Every structure is written in C-alpha cells, then in structure tokens.
Amino acid sequence: MKVYNEEQEVISLLKIGEFSVLSQISIYMLRHYDEIGLLIPEQVDEFTGYRYYSERQLPIAGKIQALKSMGLSLNLMKEILTKYADNAGLKTYLELQAIEQKEKIEHMQKQLNLLETTIANLDHASDIPLYSVALKRIPAHYVISVRGIIETPDKEAELWERLAQERKRQKIQFANPAWNIAVFHDEGFQERDLDVEIQQAVIGKCHDTDVMKCKKVEEITAATLTFKGRYELLPQANEEIIRWIGDNQYKLDGNRPPHQKPERLSLPLLPMPHWEGPQF
C-alpha cells in the first residue's frame, strides 16, 4: 500500500505481519511497543484497527533490537530514541549505561564468589561456621572510649566497667546499635600486657576525662563474624574471617584514623570481627 504523508511524499506501508518479518520483531511485541509509545505505527485503519508501518521505520526497529540486545529496558529505549538523535549524545548516554552494567557485573561476581566459597567451606571442620561472615557497612558515629593495658584478653571486662562508670557519671545515652568494639593496638600478637581500646556508640554530647575520650568514628565497611562461644575461640574466628577476605577477593583497608600512629593497625578499621562487650 502507498499513501502520501504530510509533506505529500509517497510512502509505502507494510502490514504488521510484513513489518514483523522484515524487522524480526514479533507481532505481539510490535503491538506492545505501540501501546507504550516506543514504536507507533505509521497509520492505523480507523475502521478495522489494522496497524500499518512504513519502510522508513525499519531503521528505528533495528535500533530497538540493538538496544534490546544490550539489556536495556523498554523505558530506557524510549528515552534514547526520543532524546538522543545525534551520535555524540547517544555515545555519552551509552557510556554511562556501560559503567552501570560493569558495576552490576562486579556486584554479581562478588555474590558468585560468596556462593562458591560458602559451598566449598561447608565441609570445613570448625566450631565457627564460615557462612556466618557477613559484609556490613558501619555508619559514621560518635563513641566514648577507654584505652588501657590489660594483663590478658579475658581482663577486657575491666575496661568496660570503667567505661560504664564514666558513662553513668555523665548520664550519656548509648546509641542503638551501640557498636561495642574492642580495638587491639598492638602491632603483633601478644599474650600479655595488651594495648586495648574499647568503644561504644553514644547519642548526644560528652566531654573527655582522664579515663574516657569522646570522638567520631568514620564510616567503615567491615567483614563481620558473629558467634557465641568461649573467648579462646577468637583466634579461630580471626583465621576464619581472614580466609573469607582472601577467598572473596577483598583487601584489608590501610587507612588509619588521624589519632593513630601510621604504623598502628586498628582492628575495626580493617575488615575484621568485632567483639560485642557487655551492656551496662
């Protein structure tokens, strides 16, 4: 069929079935594209409702097929066809889409790594199941902290008692969650005389004392492991979480807070487990 357009040019019209064959788009999808305004027929018979397309719409159909093969949604296709007629604008837009797709791929790869490492370690004999490790984002928060030298790890409770006394004296309210964290400041492993700092997130203002300090802890991303057991299991927990970090292709964060010496390693600032102290 041939008709005249508004410019009095002769155009050839194709039945929907013919256009479907030439464009490699099913009749069902052509009707759907018409309904959402993505590819509107050149003409619709007002009596029969038959849809007719023109040959000049075939390049548009080709673009739709190309965009579809890129995994773009119908809404994005419509936006591209209506807003980006020139190649420069289209290139910029597609570059942004490519970046988003890469980020999705990276996220899915991390999920796949988690699945594979969990499957591989389900038979791993341990008192601490590896699948308990979870990646968490700990937001920036204000803390009160007490730092001191403790004779052995099990003496950490003494620091929490000192912190509780100072908190009660200043009537400080702890946050929810309280993010109770113990930071081991020693450079290497020590059995005795450990340099430990405990922190508890709080609400409102507080002031430093000879015993307690008030400060802000910046946001961190941490690999965390939650388990219930004896304090002696902490070394095993460390082994599990370090292995998890390596298996899932994460790296320890080398950034240090300004109040620490550069050579010091702060346990919570690395993707390491934290120990939840007692609530007073």
Image: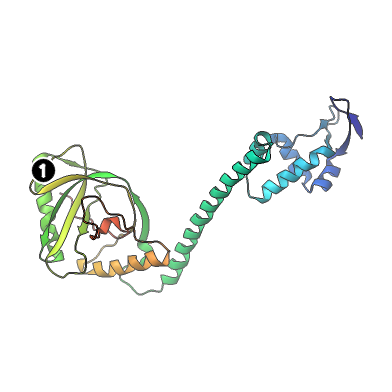
The outermost residue toward the right is 1
Above/below status of 45 relative to 23: above
Measuring from the top left, give residue 16's x and y in whole percent. 83, 40
Question: How did the renderer colour the structure?
Answer: rainbow
Measuring from the top left, give residue 27's x and y in whole percent. 78, 44
Tell me the SS state at disc 1. helix
Q: Is residue 192 left or right of residue 1?
A: left
Residue that appears at 26% across and 59% down: 267
Q: Which residue is mark 1?
A: 168
Q: Is residue 100 left or right of residue 59?
A: left
Above/below status of 108 relative to 140: below
Q: Is residue 67 left or right of residue 148?
A: right
Residue that appears at 44% across and 71% down: 120
Measuring from the top left, give residue 105's x and y in whole percent. 53, 55
The amino acid type, in three-letter code, at marker 1 is Lys
Report the quarter where the N terminus lies.
top right
* Residue 96 makes an appearance in the image: yes
> How many neighbours does mark 1 have within 10 angstroms: few (below 14), some (14-19), or many (20 or more)?
few
Above/below status of 258 relative to 236: above
Number of numbered discs overlaid on the protein picture? 1
Q: Is residue 123 left or right of residue 71?
A: left
* Residue 122 makes an appearance in the image: no
Residue that appears at 29% across and 60% down: 273
Q: In which image quadrant can residue 96 be found? A: top right
Measuring from the top left, give residue 67's x and y in whole percent. 67, 46
